[in-house]
Image (tube, rainbow, N blue to C red):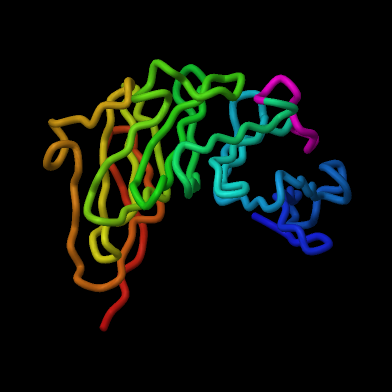
Amino acid sequence: GGATVNGQPQVALTRYTTAGLPDITFGSGGSTLTPVGQSATAFGLAIDGLNRIVVVGTSDSSLLIMRYDASGNLDGTFGSGGITTDAIGSQNTSFGVAFDSLGRPVVCGSIDDVAFVGRYTPTGILDGTFGTGGITQAAVGAYSVFYDVAVETSGDIVATGFADDVDVVTARFDASGTLDGSFGSGGVASVLFNTPSAGRAVSIDTLGDIFIGGFSCSN
């Protein structure tokens, strides 16, 4: 999430105990605050197999990804001092993150109003073997966003979000970042609700079936 300190929005991260209390062994009193640039907000996180916490969001309109150790300290082996920012377009935001079988963070979000998925190396650099320079955009409608992402055991990537405010869209990409033409129509499945709607969460069961959660507003 985020918190404003002295007028500056910063990335906020909190850990709770199993009893629902702030875990005072994490960060400072259970929380960490990290300034990045002039303004930063986190929208998604995931925990890898080493209990490291990867957080994604936006900073000064750039893609933001950060990694913390299990104690809440920035991991200096990731990016630059634990932080990577990338300005692919003029407006860049990551909303979701998951890991593939090699521990690489796979992210999703929007770049200049076009939904995207991207992949980083385990050291926090955009993976040039994925898509174009680590990014694949999916031009679905005039305006689109992916809010959440999951990785299948095969390595395929599933992302969900919306297009043009009224379509819930779900796309599947192969492990190289190419839309999977065997899924939906050209790699994209959509449900039109004709009211403000979006897929906000995606999960894949042991049979490979894809579950989407989200919202649709009634008139």
Q: In the image, which residues are magenta? A: 70-79
Q: Is residue 105 above or below residue 64?
A: above
The residue at the point 28 percent across, 31 percent down is 173
Screen quadrant of the N terminus: bottom right
Seen in the image, is 95 located left or right of residue 197?
right
Q: Quadrant of residue 50?
A: top right
Using residue 41 as the reference point, say whether residue 188 is left or right of it. Answer: left
Q: Is residue 62 left or right of residue 50?
A: left
Rendered position, 103 above or below 68: above
- x, y (%) of residue 143? 30, 56
Magenta highlight: main SS: loop
Q: Locate residue 59, reporting x and y percent.
A: 62, 47
Identify whether 69 is placed above or below 188: above
Q: Is residue 162 magenta?
A: no
| In the displayed structure image, the side of residue 27 where residue 61 appears, left or right | left
The residue drawn where x is 76% and y is 47% is 35
Q: How many marks?
A: 0
Instruction: Give the quarter of the image for residue 83.
Output: top right
x then y, percent, for residue 142: 25, 56
Quadrant where the C terminus is found in the figure: bottom left
Residue 130 in the image, given as x and y percentages of width and height = 38, 21
Q: Nearer the viewer, residue 141 or 22?
A: 141
* Nearest to the observer: residue 75 or residue 59: 59
Residue located 26% across and 35% down the image = 172
Q: Nearer the viewer, residue 137 or 192?
A: 137
Q: Residue furthest toward the front?
A: 90
Q: Residue at x 80, y 34 (%)?
A: 73
